Image (cartoon, helix red, strand yellow):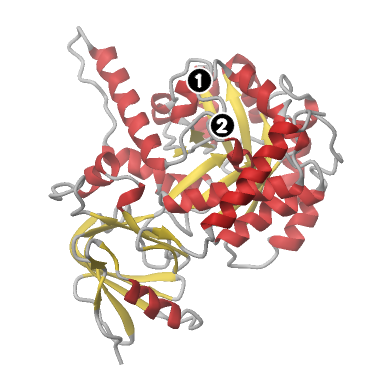
Amino acid sequence: MTDRILPLTSSGTTSPAVLEQLQRRSADPKRRVLFTGATIVTMDPDYGVLDGADLLVEGDTITAIGPALSREGAVVVDATGTILTPGFVDTHRHAWQTQLRRIMPDVDDLGAYVMSTLAGYATVYRPDDMYVGTRLAALTAIDSGITCMLDFSHNSRTPEHSDAAVQALIDTGIRGVHASMGPHFGDWDKQWPGDLARLKEKYFAGEDRLLTLRLAALATDEVAGAALAYGPELARTAKDLGIGVSVDAVFGVSSSRAILDWERAGILDADLTLIHATGLTPEAWRAIGESDTTIALAPTSDAQIGLETAIPAIDEALSVGVRPGLSIDVEVALVSDMFTQMRALHAIQRMRAVNTAYGTNQQPARITTHDVLDFATLQGARTNGLGGVTGSLTPGKKADLLVIQAEDLNNMPLNDAVGTVVLGSDARNISAVLINGEPRKWNGQVLDVDLAALRDEVHASREYVLNTPAV
């Protein structure tokens, strides 16, 4: 028996009647949802871009893609006039800071950010503030099409602070990666990294969960001392727990020296992600490329805060065979969405390529819109250690996908699907977001959120943080 076919769009928005059907069958682990007639940007090289095709979700998994799939037993969604893409993957965001959004939009440099946010506001955070900031970040991510977010949670002052950050990811339904690190400054329990074992047992022990645990660290001891700097001891902790490592503040000569030390120690490998990677030496890039270490770029952060060269290290990464993931970084000074990261990187790299070739007979080596969408999806998933789980619309992967309106005012007419996603679309065009097969945004609205109550919580937390003296 096939449920009645209902159009995805009704007066230009996702039909509430389709959502009702999906929710009515949400308890069925074999629930079948068939999207029909869409332009499907799979980001899987074996499938490419399919026009007027169908995509089948069974339970939490994509099971088939192609023309004229069977409708037997499915909730059939007419997706004509839309683009289906994988959800975006954010490889690095400090989510706890979100109630301080754009508090320093014209930040001068890294030092100004560190002293105001990490040495100041961070020191007064309560577990409830961790929860509020992280939840707001995750809900905003979902609204803008980010289905997987790595939360670089570097304000874990007590076990309760970590619990609150993890619980916020759980409560939003995002595919969350909790990367835990102790704080840079102020009083804390010194429970990290030992508390990682407790966190893993409490939240991450089961198979096939939405949550992933990683160890977070800094590249060197320059900012916050040796305890937070990646090295053999922290690498051993991560290996013992069977988790990956994300290392922030990777830039310049000192980080380059550290990378070569890690290479000699045998702890530079595919389980390690290096964040930013600006201003590194050619020898450090050689070591990265030969070790399959992953890279998380933060295009707007590097450029706006002015980290080392201030140029996202895309050419350096590609030159050694590394296709990076993309990230948001700090909302105290930056944007929240992946569309901006893609466009910023696309523009900066192409400007740099043309400038380098200007006045010569060389052809500029320019990246494409397909490249940056690849970085924002498939490569981001790989960078987060989830390449086999998400990042492309591939049968067997989890159903993390976006429904983007291709016939909205700012997108019509549809001429190139990848170009439309990267250069034309924004959060308002995302009519639906599915994570693990469950609708998390529908009819242009994030589901299961009391916006008025959330607003009260966010404002109350902000007022407490801003009006409590740093300790």
Is residue 32 toward the left or the right of residue 294 in the image? left
In front of the other: 359 or 11? 11
Q: In this view, does 52 lie above or below 182?
A: below
Is residue 74 toward the left or the right of residue 305 in the image? left
Distance Cα–Cα, label 2 vs label 1: 10 Å
Q: Is residue 161 above or below residue 184?
A: below
Q: Quadrant of the N terminus?
A: bottom left
Label tally: 2
Q: In which quarter of the image is residue 30?
A: bottom left
In the picture of the structure, the residue carrying the numbered disc 1 is 106
Q: Is residue 428 above or below residue 36?
A: above
Q: Which mark is residue 195?
A: none
In the picture of the structure, the residue carrying the numbered disc 2 is 332
Identify which amino acid the numbered label 2 is placed on.
Val
Tell me which numbered mark, 2 or 1, is placed earlier along the sequence.
Answer: 1
Q: Can residue 231 be seen in this view?
A: no
| Image point (45%, 37%), residue name | 324
| Image point (60%, 45%), residue name | 151
Q: Quadrant of residue 264?
A: top right
| Image point (55%, 35%), residue name | 101
In front of the other: 229 or 362? 229
Name the secondary structure under disc 1: loop
Residue 327 % position (x, y): 49, 38
